[in-house]
Image: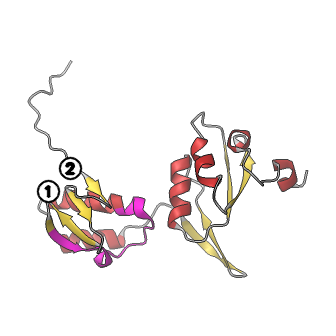
Amino acid sequence: QQDFSNIKSHLYTVSLNDKASIYVDNNGDIYINDKYLLNRKDIITELKGEHNLKNILFALMVSHIYGLDLTKTLESIKNFKPLEHRMELVGKYDGIIFYNDVIATIPEATINACTALENVNTLIFGGLDRKIDYSGYNARFITAKEIPVGICKVWYKIVPIPDTPPLTTLLGT
């Protein structure tokens, strides 16, 4: 067994609401150790959502810790390409915008996508039962205006959702 007692460590925190090692204030200003770094508007990225902003804050923190050039770090963030099949814009048809998010395999990922992508009103999901807790879907969609459409083996774990027709009705079987 290895002895890790001589390893020095530091705890760094990230927040979008409260003071932390790196945080964003109400004006969108980003601070590291209470020193102004830049405004959120200065970050150019294809990444959507508050969850991705947190990831960017972690990257900025690491860059700061290692003394990397902020301009180069921001350029890397700007050039970073999101994962294929993760909140990926497919196209627009008849005024409807379609996104591919098939690799969002847990409720939190799907919920983050629905929050990041505005005006989601239909969700088509599917896949194998990964034997995880799917109650997050109910917590999000029970009061939402979205209409979840399930085509998967886990549908029975997510339904009943009020005012949602049964799967057989949705599939026309």
Question: In the rendering, which numbered label is found on residue 23?
Answer: none
Q: Is residue 23 magenta?
A: no
Where is 159 relative to 22, above or below?
Answer: above
Residue 170 is left or right of residue 154, and the answer is: right
**Residue located at (56% from left, 62% from top):** 114
Q: Is residue 41 magenta?
A: yes
Residues at circles 1 and 2 in contact by the CB criterion of under 8 Å: yes
Image quarter for residue 35?
A: bottom left
Residue 69 visible within the image: no
Closer to the chain start, of discs 1 and 2, is 2
The x and y percentages for residue 67 are: 11, 62
Residue at horizontal 10 percent and vertical 37 percent from the top: 8
Indicate the position of residue 78 as horizontal and vertical percent values: 34, 73
Residue picked out by circle 1: 65
Percent position of residue 74, x then y = 26, 72
Amino acid tagged 1? Ile
Image location (x, y in percent) of residue 165: 82, 53
Question: Residue at label 2?
Answer: 12
Q: Secondary structure at mark 2?
A: loop
Quadrant placement of the N terminus: top left
Q: From which residue to which does the magenta span run?
A: 36-53
Kind of residue sitting beneath label 2: Tyr
Q: How many marks?
A: 2
Residue at 55 percent of width and 66 percent of height: 88
- Of residues 28 and 130, the one drawn nearer to the viewer in this rendering: 28
At horizontal 57% and vertical 45% (from top left) the residue drawn is 136
